[in-house]
């Protein structure tokens, strides 16, 4: 039976990047998931064993980061996609059409103390309020535990991690400037009934966010997710007198430094990841209160 190669293309999918642009102390941040597909005179790769002239999908992935680096002033996803597609067609004679898709994550500048934060961002509308209640016959309400899930936050600076154990298994370098991003899960148990459960919820959340981000102009330095977690838990307990203990889980969602094509890393282009991620958790109690179980 005669078989004919009708159409073909090749590309890279799900290339995730973070891009920071710093305009003085005001930082801008985007996270993009990019797909490229090239239409090219590469019939021979399908019909023979030759890969001659092929723009490898690995090269396409590297180029996604390279063009992000080249976009040295703030640009839209559309402008970036056009630059990337144009690069493939102008750089490689065998490529006749480049197709680029970009998905932009819903990061928005966060307001802290009613002011837009210089380097703090949150994911729009992603959080869920959680409630757990136990009511026993003859006893009534035994416990009320409220929490938040999926409160996703990121800051482009004012975070470092250094002085940890270095041995032959360690590849991570000390850093005094990195992106830190997490998706907050917290549950807090009330010792008594607050006047207004919604106000208590907002109070705990606001206190935690203020500790994570710090003041809107300068932020606050985080030496580790662990340190910031304790500060956040302590702030929630201080802000809401009825909270007796709080459990916090903070995944460390890594944005890895990226140096596309011999360029220098300038805290500008990152490989965005969600897996694997660090996982930091603790329960913080008021005085001698018993820590509550993870719920
Ligand atoms: O804040 C951090 N805490 C860690 O425990 C850790 N581990 C790691 O690799 N990076 C980080 N960052």
Image: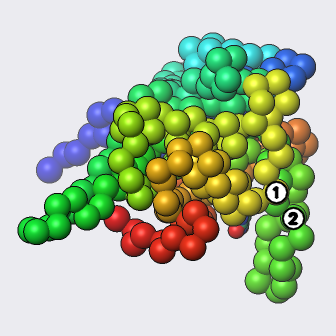
| Residue 223 disc label | 1
Q: Callout 2: helix, strand or loop?
A: loop
> 220 and 155: which one is in front?
220
Give me the C-alpha separation between circle 1 and circle 2. Answer: 8 Å
> 173 and 295: which one is in front?
295
Q: Residue 60, can we see it?
A: no
Mark 1 residue's CB less than 8 Å from ligand 1? yes
Q: Quadrant of ligand 1?
A: bottom right
> 102 and 46: which one is in front?
102
**x 61%, y 68%: residue:** 287
Kindly identify which residue carries mark 2.
162
Residue contact at pointers 1 and 2, CB within 8 angstroms:
yes
Above or below 68: residue 286 = below
Q: Residue 147, can we see it?
A: yes
Decide: few, some or many residues near mark 1? Use Cα within 10 Å; few <14, some 14-19, many ≥20: some
List x then y, in percent, for residue 24: 90, 19
Q: Quadrant of residue 150?
A: top left
Marks 1, 2: nearer the viewer? 1
Above or below 125: residue 261 = below
Q: Callout 1: helix, strand or loop?
A: loop
Q: Is residue 172 left or right of residue 197?
A: right
List x then y, in percent, for residue 167: 84, 85
């Amino acid at each position: 039976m005669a078989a004919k190669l009708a159409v073909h293309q090749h590309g890279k999918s799900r290339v995730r990047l973070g891009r920071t642009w710093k305009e003085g102390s005001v930082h801008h941040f985007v996270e993009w998931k990019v797909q490229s597909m090239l239409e090219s005179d590469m019939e021979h790769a399908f019909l023979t064993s030759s890969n001659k002239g092929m723009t490898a999908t690995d090269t396409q992935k590297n180029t996604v980061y390279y063009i992000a680096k080249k976009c040295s002033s703030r640009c839209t996803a559309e402008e970036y996609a056009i630059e990337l597609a144009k690069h493939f067609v102008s750089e490689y004679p065998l490529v006749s059409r480049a197709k680029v898709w970009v998905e932009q994550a819903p990061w928005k500048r966060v307001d802290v103390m009613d002011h837009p934060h210089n380097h703090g961002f949150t994911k729009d509308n992603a959080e869920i309020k959680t409630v757990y209640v136990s009511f026993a016959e003859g006893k009534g309400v035994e416990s009320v535990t409220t929490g938040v899930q999926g409160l996703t936050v990121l800051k482009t600076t004012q975070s470092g991690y250094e002085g940890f154990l270095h041995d032959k298994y360690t590849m991570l370098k000390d850093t005094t400037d990195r992106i830190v991003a997490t998706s907050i899960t917290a549950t807090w148990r009330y010792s008594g009934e607050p006047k207004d459960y919604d106000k208590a919820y907002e109070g705990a959340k606001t206190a935690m966010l203020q500790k994570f981000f710090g003041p809107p102009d300068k932020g606050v330095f985080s030496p580790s997710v662990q340190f910031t977690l304790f500060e956040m838990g302590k702030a929630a307990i201080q802000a809401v007198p009825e909270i007796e203990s709080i459990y916090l889980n903070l995944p460390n969602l890594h944005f890895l430094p990226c140096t596309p094509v011999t360029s220098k890393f300038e805290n500008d282009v990152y490989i965005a990841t969600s897996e694997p991620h660090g996982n930091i958790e603790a329960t913080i109690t008021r005085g001698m209160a018993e820590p509550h179980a993870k719920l």
